């Protein structure tokens, strides 16, 4: 498995846990508002840094007395060969696993659930079905997205769905998403932001206006009854 970076300590990537974060390169989406172009674009990801998996595991073993979780993010982790083996090795260290995913590979998610290799899944829902390709930046097989939603809801030990409210997504879009996943355990709305040190996959999106955190809190009031929990995440 390719590892592009290891953040040895995070208090914000897995709520309630002291985590390390493993970033992997490569993604099959091209969300124009993504700020991880160095991991997503093949011409940039291919020449980027790598951290040997053995070094990552050694670091986790050295820190296991005060870590309790490893977050695997990207990029899209389910594209990585060796993901199952890596998560099994993390399990052997005695740490919990949170997986971030775009939900495009339900076949991989099913194998991870069957192997009991994840404790928490956070799946990004880009937009309501009618606008999915627009915000994913590529044609999307919605049947695969819906199968991932089903698998996560039925097999994941714990999970959340979340939408980064990119420019162009409005109140009706978010209500449509909430209706799509009605009954889900958790749904979070995440304010759009442009990290100054990174920029966006499509720089033109940086100048587009997105809903404010205040507007998202108002929208949340109208959708909260459709899901079990969640809310509006603080802008970071």
Image (spheres, grey):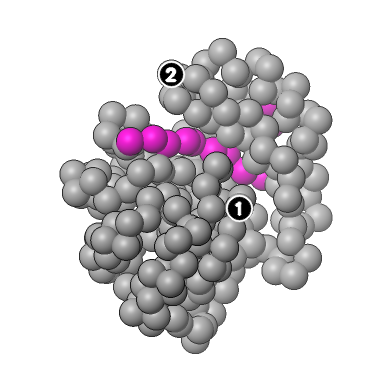
Residue assigned mark 1: 11
> What residue is rendered at 67% in x and 63% in y?
200
Of 61 and 1, nearer the camera is 61
Residue 46 seen in this snapshot: no
For the N terminus, the image quarter is bottom left
Q: Tell me the element at label 2.
A: loop
Q: Residues within 10 Å of mark 2 (few under 14, many from 20)?
A: some
Which is nearer the eye, 33 or 87?
87
Mark sitting on residue 198: none
Residue 209's place in the image compared with 222, above or below, is below
Q: Is residue 52 above or below residue 72?
A: below
Q: CA distance from mark 1 to mark 2?
A: 28 Å
Instruction: Kindly indicate whether the residue at mark 2 contacts the one at mark 1 (C-beta within 8 angstroms).
Output: no
* Residue interval drawn in magenta: 157-171
> Which residue is drawn at the image coordinates 42% and 36% (left, top)?
159
The residue drawn where x is 54% and y is 23% is 229
Query: In front of the other: label 1 or label 2?
Result: 1
Which residue position is annotated with label 2?
Answer: 183
Q: Earlier in the sequence, mark 1 or mark 2?
A: 1
Q: Is residue 199 magenta?
A: no
Q: Picture coordinates of residue 26 (x, y %)?
A: 43, 68
Using a 10 Å C-alpha cutoff, classify the residue at mark 1 as few (fewer than 14 neighbours), some (14 to 19) or many (20 or more): few
Q: Is residue 155 above or below residue 71?
A: above
Q: Secondary structure at mark 1?
A: loop
Residue, x 53% and y 53% (percent of image)? 18
Q: Residue 40: image x %, image y %?
A: 51, 68
Q: Is residue 30 above or below residue 174?
A: below
Magenta segment: does it hold 159? yes
Q: Position of residue 116 (x, y in %)?
A: 23, 46
Q: Position of residue 129 (x, y in %)?
A: 47, 34
- Counting every numbered tag in the picture gives 2
């Amino acid at each position: 498995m390719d590892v592009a970076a290891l953040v040895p300590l995070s208090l914000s990537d897995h709520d309630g846990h002291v985590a390390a974060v493993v970033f992997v390169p490569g993604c099959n989406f091209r969300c124009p508002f993504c700020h991880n172009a160095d991991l997503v674009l093949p011409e940039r990801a291919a020449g980027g840094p790598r951290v040997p998996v053995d070094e990552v595991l050694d670091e986790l073993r050295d820190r296991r007395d005060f870590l309790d979780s490893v977050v695997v993010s990207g990029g899209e982790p389910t594209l990585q060969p060796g993901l199952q083996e890596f998560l099994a090795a993390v399990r052997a260290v005695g740490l919990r696993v949170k997986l971030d995913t775009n939900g495009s590979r339900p076949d991989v998610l099913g194998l991870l659930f069957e192997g009991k290799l994840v404790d928490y899944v956070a799946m990004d829902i880009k937009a309501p079905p009618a606008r999915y390709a627009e915000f994913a930046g590529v044609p999307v097989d919605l049947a695969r997205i819906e199968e991932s939603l089903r698998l996560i809801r039925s097999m994941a030990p714990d999970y959340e769905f979340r939408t980064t409210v990119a420019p162009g997504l409005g109140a009706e879009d978010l209500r449509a998403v909430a209706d799509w996943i009605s009954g889900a355990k958790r749904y979070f709305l995440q304010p759009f932001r442009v990290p100054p040190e990174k920029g966006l996959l499509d720089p033109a999106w940086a100048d587009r206006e997105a809903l404010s955190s205040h507007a998202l809190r108002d929208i949340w009031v109208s959708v909260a009854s459709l899901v079990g929990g969640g809310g509006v995440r603080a802008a970071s």
